[in-house]
Image: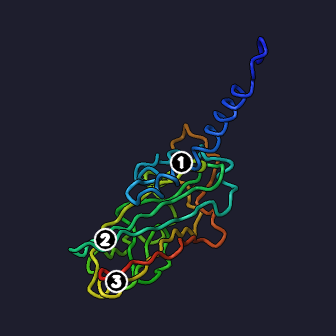
Amino acid sequence: MLQADGANPNPFIGLVLLIVLVIFVLPDRLPQFLSDLSPYLFSGIPCARLPAALDLAAHQSVIGRVVQDPLRLELSSTAIADDGGLQLRLTVINTSLGAVPIIFQDDNFAVIETDDETDGFGIIIEPAPAAGLREREELNPETYDEGDVRLLGPRQRCVHSLELRASQAMIDDGGSARAYYRMSVAGTQQPQNEATRAIYPDQGLDFLSESVVFSDPVAIAAASS
């Protein structure tokens, strides 16, 4: 019985509803709320620390294989410091209810002036910084090392930061940047040991309908503004 001796059950019911609200709403809203408080509060774990998707020939998310366009990218920039330094922060968000595999290679993360149409993560920045441009070293392989295939869980987000040095043109007039993730292949499964049954013939990487997703452009304010 919720009510005894004429006690009002409303506070108890309200507490139950509050607990339900926290369980179902807070995990989705809290990271964004914290990141809005300060650009230095990251709303996710580092992308390099996402678990590797090992043994993909036998283990893949069934939901993750059928979702389309589950990724959302958000890019932010700090102000240009007195010494010309600035930091770009990329947030990668899985908006679906399935775990999806993404290719994340810290040493193969491109920072370029124009879109080079290669697969993987990158940031397009104009004008070019004085230091920090990074061309992709490995171009569109047919298969990826499973250590580079990371699992981004349902409604999960990860973050990645890059340190750049502004050019004089950027210090004087500012600039803009936007991030992208491109994946044009499904990824060929790597050879498995004989004891593993190969259920899936590919690495499940082709879930983008246009093969690429972009963030909204972010403005980099001139140092004098």
Ranked by sequence position, the earlier of labels 3 and 2 is: 2
Determine the CA span between mark 1 and mark 2: 26 Å
Quadrant assignment for the C terminus:
bottom left
From the image, tell me which residue sits under label 3: 128
SS category of the residue bearing label 3: loop
Q: Where in the figure is residue 212, as x and y percent of width and height?
A: 57, 71
Mark 1 or mark 3, which has the lower sequence index?
A: 1
Q: How far apart are labels 3 and 2 at the CA level?
A: 13 Å
Q: In the rendered view, would you say 17 is above or below 133?
A: above
- Residue ID at (38%, 66%): 108
Nearest the viewer among 152 and 29 is 29
Residue tagged by mark 1? Answer: 30
Question: Residue beneath label 2, please?
Answer: 86
Element type where label 1 sits in the image: helix
- The amino acid marked with disc number 2 is Leu
- Identified by mark 3, the residue type is Ala
Q: Residue drawn at (44%, 50%), measured in percent from left and top? A: 45
Mark 2 secondary-structure assignment: strand
